[in-house]
Image: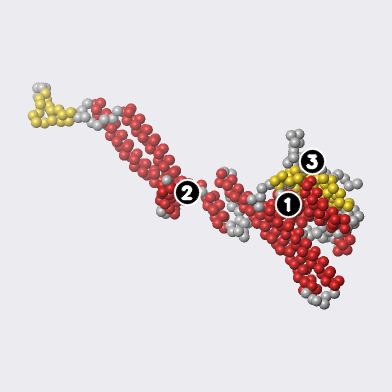
Amino acid sequence: MKVGSLRPTGLISRLPAWAQTIRFRLTLAYSAVLIALSALLLGGLYFALSAYLDPKPLDPITVKKVYREHDGDLKLKPGVVIQAAEISSIESAVNYQTLQTMRNYSAAAMGVLFAVSLGTGWWLSGRALRPVRAITATAQDISATDLSRRIALTGPRDELRNLADTVDDMLTRLEAAFVAQRQLVDDASHELRNPLAVIQANVDAVLTHDDTPPEDRAQATAIVARAIQRMTRLVEDLLASARRSSPAFVDADVDLAGIAGEAAEEYELIAADREIRLVRRLAPGPIAAGDASALRRAVDNLLSNAVRLARGGSELVLAVGSRNGWAWIAVRDDGPGIAEEDADRVFDRFFRSGERQSPATVLSTGQRRAGLGLAIVRQIVESHGGSVSLHSEVGTGSTFVLWLPDRSLTSNTRRTPTPPTEDPLGPRP
């Protein structure tokens, strides 16, 4: 069976390149169908006429020739004969000859028709496959570094137009994915460059010299430790994002109150050092499908920003709940807040709220850390089918809310198409 299955492939491979194309096969199919229909039509007409006319070859009979005498009597000519036939036999013979002529001319016409159909089929198939050639040419021009080319097929919205539009949409998504990937690599390189430069500068200037005063050595050690911590956080963010994007990853049920409680335990002492009271409002029950480590990373990033920016002696709220079929995790701080015009841009990579303010204002009010933290938060949440919302006022504080599809739905609860827009923690006291 294996040998038999390989024979057609070998035979086709020995044909010329033009004979292996879809255009050639369409031409043959078009011509074969046309000739078959013509043969059926002419054959049916031939047999119908044959049955109706009853054609037969001429059946002559031999008779002797006669002549008339002067007195009117008929006399036989000795030794002279002629061929004769009945009138019905002559009619059948004429019909027979006509059908024979019709058959010969039909065969010649079908030969000419076959040659014409080959040319017509080649032309028609070429016009029909022109969009395919455009798709092929565009695909050949596309490289891994340039996905900007589009087919942009015009004409009627038929199957080939839909195919071209689908390919264009796929190229748009691929281009966006490649751009995002390159941007992420560039951002990560930029983010890692600064702490590495800080570590290198402190090692060269302070830690490598034996005569460095103890206080300078201690200060340099603290700076290096902070730079290492910053790089560690970035690497963890990138690992969380890459893990979530892996096609081999399988979603699991995640207890949101559990991961929020773990994050609160980690940051409780850090908050206490700044005299910030961490309040937990962790309602049990909300379940999300996804990666617990990635979601924990998103909560850690929000808590890290909140602890760093909240005013000393203020209150930091970490809450979990569900509403309208959506589970949520909220982090509220009493920091400097974010202007309304910056609410949509705060999740951009390396965006810095307050960048349009004077340096004195920035130093006095504080600002969101420029980096990948909030961008990673949005990427993680959106990869789980959720969204991130921000409720903030300048000078009052901010509330970040992670909305995720709730897996713990009951038969009486249905999920709304989009998450609620209001702050689940309600207005500030």
Residue at 73 percent across and 46 percent down: it is: 254
**Can residue 2 be seen at all in this image of the molecule?**
yes
Give whichever of discs 2 and 3 has the lower sequence position.
2
Amino acid found under the numbered disc labelled 2: Ile
Q: Which sits in the foreground, 380 or 138? A: 380
Residue 310 image label: none
Q: How many marks?
A: 3
**Which one is nearer the viewer's eye here, 194 or 69?**
194
From the top left corner, tell me how far across and down residue 325 is, in percent: 76, 40
Spatial distance from mark 3 to mark 1, Cα to Cα?
Answer: 24 Å
Q: Position of residue 409 (x, y in %)?
A: 74, 38
User: Mark 2 and mark 1: span between their CA atoms?
Assistant: 51 Å
Q: At 76% across and 51% down in the image, what residue appears?
A: 296
Q: Amino acid at mark 1?
A: Ser
Which residue appears at 43% of the width and 40% of the height?
33
The residue identified by callout 2 is 22
Give the number of the mark in front: 2 or 1. 1
Which of the 4 image quarters holds residue 416? top right
Residue 293 got which mark? 1
- Residue 18 location, x and y as percent? 44, 53
Name the residue tied to disc 3.
323
Q: Which amino acid lies under the numbered mark 3 shown in the image of this protein?
A: Arg
Q: Is residue 208 above or below residue 156?
A: below
Q: Is residue 79 above or below residue 389?
A: above
Instruction: Determine whether 222 is above or below 333 in the image.
Output: below
Q: Position of residue 14 (x, y in %)?
A: 41, 53
3 or 1: mark nearer the eye: 1
The answer to which of marks 3 and 1 sits earlier in the sequence is: 1
At mark 1, the secondary structure is: helix
| SS type, badge 3 | strand
Question: Which of the two discs, 2 and 3, sits closer to the camera?
Answer: 3
